[in-house]
Image: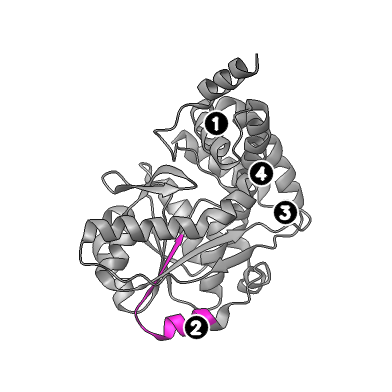
């Protein structure tokens, strides 16, 4: 309930403001949150230390602070979505692969878009809806119903259809059977749907749900990211990278789930390495890895 009212207050304060000013406020708030949200900060730093291959807490800290600030911008973008016209949504996304996407959709096999908590992922789905694509998104639900109403209501007003996670079974298969698009996040696995795969040279723990759905439906698998572009802060210029994975199942479902998930994660590696400050992952992706503080202490000991 507290989160809901804080979110409502943020909407009340920032929605009337120019986007650039909202970003400035979000950056300041993010700096405060970086200190107060210790559990999330530690998990983010652990992940980023592996991505940038640094055991120096000061180096990791600088990247993590930028990630918090970018996440603050994401919140501001999300708050502005419901008051954006479809033309503005379309203008904000730079993408040149529409013909390939149309060809994939024409197969009527359904398209599973697999993404991460990276960049401005919600804007990708919003843009697809603005262009008239039938896009469904599997969404987590909150314990407080009013929070669900405000979050999912914002997405619905942009033309997206969302499927509650606890009702995902039938909704997911029906959407893909109709030849529609389904968007899912892979970097935060639901309870009981975890798989371990090699990611950036170490064993990572991610969701097995996208691979299982793809294998059981025969849909296209399209790993995608929506990158916040390098333009000035008053303008969002995300860039979508999109390509389909062709995987031939062996008939051993558990083996196929691991291998298909590994391929999906491998296709996203380069974006994470190039733009680590745009990956908002507040849980440990590599849980078996030695903690950063321990690695830093060992590195210091070797240098002394």
Q: Quadrant of the C terminus?
A: top right
Residue behind mark 3: 19
Check disc 1: other Cα within 10 Å, few if <14, some if 14-19, many if 20+: many
Q: Earlier in the sequence, mark 3 or mark 4?
A: 4
| Residue at image mark 4 | 13
Q: Tell me the SS state at disc 4.
A: helix
Write the start and end of the magenta stretch as one range: 100-114
The quadrant holding residue 170 is bottom left
For marks 3 and 2, the one nearer the N-term is 3
Residue occupying image coordinates x 63% and y 68%? 89
Earlier-in-chain disc, 3 versus 1: 3
- Residue 96 is covered by the magenta coloring: no
Q: Position of residue 36 (x, y in %)?
A: 57, 25
**Residue depicted at 51% across the width and 57% down the height:** 268
Q: Alpha carbon of mark 3 to alpha carbon of mark 1: how far?
A: 26 Å
Q: What x and y, as percent, mark residue 161?
A: 41, 67
Q: Nearer the viewer, mark 2 or mark 4?
A: 2
Q: CA distance from mark 3 to mark 4?
A: 12 Å
Q: Tell me if 92 is positioned left or right of 283 in this view.
A: right
- Determine contact: label 2, label 4, CB under 8 Å: no
Q: Is residue 281 above or below residue 136?
A: above
Mark 3 crowdedness (10 Å alpha carbons): few <14, some 14-19, many ≥20: some
Q: Which label was assigned to residue 102?
A: 2
| Residue 94, quarter of the rendered image | bottom right
Q: In this picture, is 202 found above or below 171?
A: above
Q: Nearer the viewer, residue 225 or 11?
A: 225
């Amino acid at each position: 309930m507290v989160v809901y009212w804080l979110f409502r207050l943020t909407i009340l304060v920032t929605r009337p403001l120019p986007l650039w000013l909202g970003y400035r406020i979000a950056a300041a708030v993010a700096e405060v949150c970086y200190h107060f949200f210790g559990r999330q900060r530690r998990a983010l730093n652990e992940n980023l230390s592996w991505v940038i291959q640094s055991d120096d807490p000061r180096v990791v800290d600088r990247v993590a602070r930028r990630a918090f600030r970018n996440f603050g911008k994401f919140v501001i973008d999300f708050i502005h979505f419901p008051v954006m016209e479809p033309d503005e949504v379309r203008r904000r996304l730079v993408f040149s692969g529409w013909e390939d996407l149309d060809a994939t959709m024409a197969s009527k096999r359904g398209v599973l878009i697999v993404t991460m908590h990276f960049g401005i992922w919600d804007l990708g789905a919003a843009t697809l809806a603005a262009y008239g694509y039938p896009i469904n998104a599997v969404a987590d639900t909150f314990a407080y119903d009013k929070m669900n109403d405000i979050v999912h209501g914002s997405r619905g007003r942009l033309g997206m259809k969302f499927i509650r996670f606890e009702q995902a079974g039938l909704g997911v298969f029906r959407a893909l059977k109709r030849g529609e698009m389904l968007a899912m996040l892979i970097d935060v696995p639901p309870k009981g749907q975890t798989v371990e795969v090699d990611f950036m040279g170490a064993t990572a723990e991610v969701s097995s749900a996208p691979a299982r759905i793809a294998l059981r439906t025969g849909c296209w698998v399209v790993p995608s990211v929506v990158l916040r572009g390098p333009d000035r802060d008053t303008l969002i210029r995300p860039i979508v990278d999109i390509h389909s994975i062709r995987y031939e199942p062996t008939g051993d479902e558990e083996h196929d789930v691991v291998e298909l998930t590994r391929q999906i994660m491998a296709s996203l590696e380069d974006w994470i390495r190039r733009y680590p400050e745009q990956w908002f992952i507040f849980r440990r992706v590599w849980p078996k890895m030695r903690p950063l503080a321990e690695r830093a202490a060992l590195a210091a000991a070797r240098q002394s």
